[in-house]
Amino acid sequence: MKLPADLSPDKILVVDDNEDVATMIETLLKKGGYEVHTANDGDVAFELLEEHAQYPENDFDLVITDQEMPNMLGSELIANIRDDPDFKSLKVILITTLPQDDFQDVSFDSFMQKPLDLVLLLGMVRDLLSE
């Protein structure tokens, strides 16, 4: 979490193998005033998280991840995030076409079933980042 004196925008990592979806979310969040980075799978996303963790002022504040992706599922990415002491407090939103009941054992902070409701997604982001 950023210090009150830090006026830099919250940093969000969007992880989705569908470029159109990733771009749509990125555009929404940038218009909302956030700094946004994207990754096309969980492996790339976790590498970005580790790179940014080397410099605390560059840490991500939130990850929005799709479930169905090559190389690493969104639920696996979330498990890796929760298992790493550097990222345990990182907020995570899981987005997927599957029902939320399929993810009872996944430790996300918020969930959205596709098709995405962009207004609701932006509200989720704002709520999580204001905690």
Image: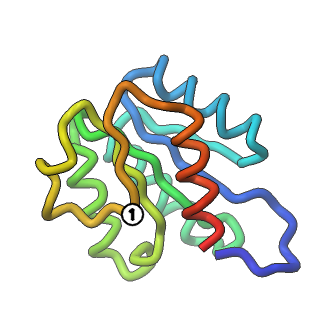
Quadrant for residue 57, please give it.
Answer: bottom right
- 20 up-or-down from 43: above or below: above
- Give the side of residue 3 with respect to residue 98, left or right: right
Q: Residue at coordinates 61% horizontally, 33% vertically from top-left? A: 26
Colour basis: rainbow
Q: Give coordinates of residue 102: x percent, y percent.
A: 11, 48
Q: Residue at coordinates 43% horizontally, 29% vertically from top-left? A: 116
Q: Residue furthest top?
A: 20
Count of numbered circles on the image: 1
Quadrant (top left/top right/bottom left/bottom right) for the C terminus: bottom right
Quadrant for residue 11, please give it.
Answer: bottom right
- Give the side of residue 90 with respect to residue 84, left or right: right
Quadrant (top left/top right/bottom left/bottom right) for the N terminus: bottom right
Q: Secondary structure at mark 1?
A: loop
Seen from the viewer's position, the closer of residues 67 and 81 is: 67
Q: Which residue is mark 1?
A: 109
Q: Residue at coordinates 64% horizontally, 43% vertically from top-left? A: 36
Looking at the rendered structure, the kind of residue marked 1 is Asp
Q: Give coordinates of residue 17: x percent, y percent.
A: 36, 28
- Give the side of residue 44 with respect to residue 8, left or right: left
Quadrant for residue 99, please give it.
Answer: top left
Q: Give coordinates of residue 91: x percent, y percent.
A: 47, 65
Q: Give coordinates of residue 35: x percent, y percent.
A: 71, 47
